[in-house]
């Protein structure tokens, strides 16, 4: 089950993940952005700082070039989380529809021309949505967590093969999601 209170505590980090996974802009690299998004005890603190340090070794032009080379020209690094599992199968369309309905349930309007499994959009949803008063939020969020788990697993493997700085970012996202899962107690 998903611990929505913990998920809510990490909202700002999902905003960070969303912005860093979109095409890089100068404002995305303001030092305060990292510090505001990750406290020392955050599960992705070390990953976010490793990513940040790698990116600050590059100029903005180099970061933009690396982003394009990685996410636009590497098929295995697609930012569409259902692509890895379904590619263009009929099931993918059904999953995209389910995600779109989930977003709409929580008041998020889909950007024109964007698919609901786009990783930055999924992170933006976790950042922007208000779910604390929604009784069925843990149940509803199982879908988004499942899609993120599958998609980021494959994305992380591809980024590790490329030795991409983005691997730290995706690893941090995965650690954050894992920290939001309630541990089931087993009775002896």
Image (tube, helix red, strand yellow):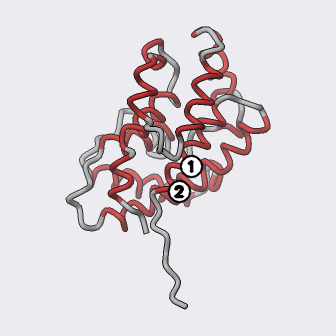
Q: Quadrant of the N terminus?
A: bottom left
Viewer-nearest residue: 160 or 187 = 187
Residue 131 relative to residue 98: left or right? left
- Which residue carries the number 1 mark? 174
The residue positioned farthest toward the front in the image shown: 40
Q: Position of residue 41 (x, y in %)?
A: 47, 44
The residue positioned farthest toward the right in the image shown: 161
> In percent of the image, x 43 and y 28: which residue is there?
35
Classify mark 1: helix, strand or loop. Answer: helix
State whether residue 69 is above or below residue 91: above
> In percent of the image, x 61 and y 16: which residue is there?
63
The residue positioned farthest toward the left in the image shown: 133
> In percent of the image, x 56 and y 50: which residue is there?
175
In which quarter of the view is residue 64 placed? top right
Q: Position of residue 135 (x, y in %)?
A: 24, 67
Viewer-nearest residue: 10 or 28 = 10
Q: Position of residue 65 (x, y in %)?
A: 65, 15
Classify mark 2: helix, strand or loop. Answer: helix
- Which residue carries the number 2 mark? 178
Viewer-nearest residue: 119 or 28 = 28
Residue 77 relative to residue 95: left or right? right
> In percent of the image, x 60 and y 37: which residue is there?
47
State whether residue 63 is above or below residue 102: above
The residue positioned farthest toward the bottom in the image shown: 188
Residue 71 relative to residue 182: left or right? right
Q: Quadrant of the C terminus?
A: bottom right
Marker disc for residue 50: none
Label 2 CA crowd tier, 10 Å (few <14, some 14–19, many 20+): some
What's the CA distance linking mark 1 and mark 2? 6 Å
Q: Position of residue 6 (x, y in %)?
A: 38, 55
Label 1 CA crowd tier, 10 Å (few <14, some 14–19, many 20+): some
The reply to whether callout 1 and callout 2 are in contact (CB within 8 Å) is yes
């Amino acid at each position: 089950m998903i611990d929505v209170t913990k998920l809510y505590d990490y909202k700002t980090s999902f905003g960070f993940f969303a912005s860093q996974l979109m095409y890089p802009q100068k404002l995305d690299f303001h030092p305060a952005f990292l510090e505001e998004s990750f406290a020392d005890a955050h599960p992705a603190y070390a990953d976010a700082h490793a990513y940040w340090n790698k990116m600050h070794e590059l100029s903005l032009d180099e970061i933009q070039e690396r982003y394009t080379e990685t996410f636009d020209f590497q098929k295995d690094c697609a930012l569409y989380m259902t692509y890895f599992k379904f590619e263009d199968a009929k099931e993918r369309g059904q999953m995209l529809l389910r995600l779109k309905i989930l977003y709409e349930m929580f008041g998020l309007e889909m950007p024109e021309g964007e698919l609901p499994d786009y990783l930055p959009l999924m992170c933006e949803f976790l950042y922007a949505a208000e779910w604390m008063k929604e009784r069925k939020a843990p149940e509803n969020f199982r879908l988004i967590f499942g899609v993120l788990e599958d998609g980021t697993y494959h994305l992380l493997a591809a980024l590790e093969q490329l030795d991409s700085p983005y691997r730290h970012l995706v690893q941090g996202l995965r650690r954050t999601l894992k920290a939001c899962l309630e541990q089931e107690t087993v009775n002896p």
